[in-house]
Image (cartoon, helix red, strand yellow):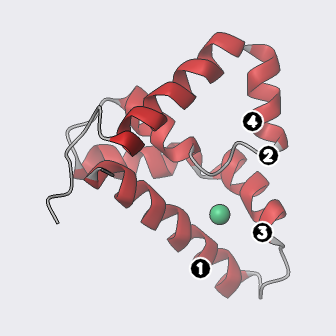
Amino acid sequence: MATKEYVAATIIHELVHGYYNETKGRSLYEDAQHNDMAVEYVKPMAEALVGIFSVTAQDAMALSWAGLYGTSAWETLKSLDPAKATTIKLISENYKNGYKGTKCNH
Ligand SMILES: [Zn+2]
């Protein structure tokens, strides 16, 4: 049911964790990594997805937010623009459930 775009976003997310663990010697706990990722890496992660798939910048951004909903950066976005937050979550769910994107065939 998952799509290639969603799987790729998940792998990129895990790679960024790997990068933090290597460069910061695991001193940043997962929640802290997520906060930092939300602030520093949502844009580059989205750009990577746009480079790989034919997704819009908005969809790529939404995919990059997946897994970062528990962060203070997300809470800030939600309080500043609730409609945008709802849209981001909906787009991401659509890729997760296969309503949007390219379904994995195996
Ligand atoms: Zn994570």
Are discs 2 and 4 less than 8 Å apart at CB? yes
Whole-angstrom CA distance, mark 2 to mark 4, is 5 Å
Amino acid under disc 3:
Glu
Whole-angstrom CA distance, mark 1 to mark 2, is 19 Å
Q: Which residue is mark 4?
A: 74
What label sits on residue 71 in the rendered view?
Answer: 2
Give the image quarter of residue 7: bottom left
Residue 30: image location, x then y, percent: 78, 68
Q: Which residue is mark 1?
A: 18
The foreground one among 52 and 102 is: 102
Residue 53: image location, x then y, percent: 22, 46
Amino acid under disc 4:
Trp
Q: Secondary structure at mark 2?
A: loop
Whole-angstrom CA distance, mark 2 to mark 3, is 11 Å
Amino acid under disc 2:
Thr
What label sits on residue 30 in the rendered view?
Answer: 3
Ligand 1 within 8 Å of disc 4? The answer is no
Of marks 3 and 1, which one's residue comes earlier in the chain? 1
Ligand 1 within 8 Å of disc 3? The answer is yes
